[in-house]
Amino acid sequence: EGVRPLIGPQSWALSLQNGLGSEEIIARFVPTARLLRGSTAQGATLLEPGRIRWAGQGPTLLGLLPGVAQPPQPQAQEIIAALGRAGLPAGFTRQLEAVLWEKLLVNAAINPLTALLDLPNGRLVEEPTLRVILSDIIAEALPLARQHGVRLSPEEAVARVEQVCRATSGNISSMLQDLRGGKRTEIDFITGALLEEGRRRGRSLPLNRLLWALVAGSTRQARHHRV
């Protein structure tokens, strides 16, 4: 809503947000043929307005929405080039669904735990009990992710999440940053998206549902105290 006056009849939009579902909201304002979605793996902590501590760079991949069969237009390539000039090398993929679901798996394991326990990412693999919880979260979510092209085995999925924890060990997850700041978190777009997919496919995810409820409740409490 805040940028609606900037959207013209030929505008393109790109969503690089965590989780799933943001592009459906953006599609209310931009036709799907001119809407890109993507995944980026940047470890960063907002220290104060206008000041960010960057903790590591991973791949940035863009793609079209499902059902949009046309090849990437010149405007999409211009967006990729602009990201590159800004120090964010990006590429285009037609397998973005699997990329997004693999990232969702990582976010669903790391973000709620770090937010609830007020810990940096790396602490999740330093404590044996937390590593067990990470594995249990992944075990619940992986069958859903495999329906969307993720080809990781359970062992590979756990190793992938632990690798991200170690690579961003000092990073404060976006969900924890939001909780500390009394802001709305991404829990509905991350764990909530998993729960919705589980509902559609008749799968129960009790641990993820518990984490969703705890973060949602903590978010309301934090926002109440901020007010």
Image (spheres, helix red, strand yellow):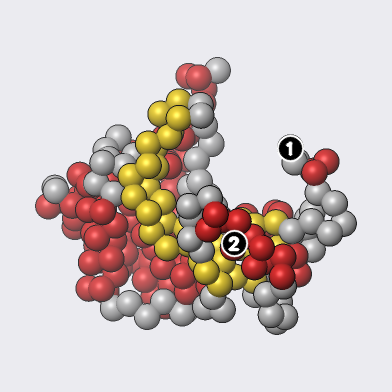
- Asked whether residue 56 is in view, the answer is yes
Residue 157 rendering spot, x and y as whole percentages: 29, 70
Q: Name the residue under label 2.
A: 81
In the rendered image, which quarter contains the N terminus? top right
- Secondary structure of the residue carrying tag 1 is loop
Q: Which mark is residue 31?
A: none
User: Please, what is the three-letter code of the amino acid marked with disc 1?
Assistant: Gly
What x and y, as percent, mark residue 191?
45, 55
* Residue at x-position 24% and y-position 46%: 169
Q: Residues within 10 Å of mark 2 (few under 14, many from 20)?
A: some
Q: In this view, does 103 lie above or below 168?
A: below
What amino acid is at disc 2?
Ala
Residue 21 place in picture, x, y as percent: 61, 58
Which quadrant would the C terminus be assigned to in this image? Answer: top right
Query: Do the residues bearing badges 2 and 1 touch, measured as CB atoms within 8 Å?
Result: no
**Figure check: 224 above or below 118:** above
Left or right, 63 with respect to 208, comes to: right
- Nearest to viewer (mark 2 / mark 1): 2
Residue in view at x 84 percent, y 59 percent: 10
Looking at the rendering, which quadrant does residue 142 occupy? bottom left
Report the residue at 35% width, 66% height from top: 140
Query: How far apart in space, not on screen, are marks 2 and 1 (Cα)?
Result: 26 Å
Q: Where in the figure is residue 71, as x and y percent of width and height?
A: 69, 80
- In the image, taking residue 168 as reference, residue 193 lies left or right, namely right
Q: Which of marks 2 and 1 is nearer the N terminus?
A: 1
Task: Look at mark 1 in the image and give the residue it sits on.
Answer: 2
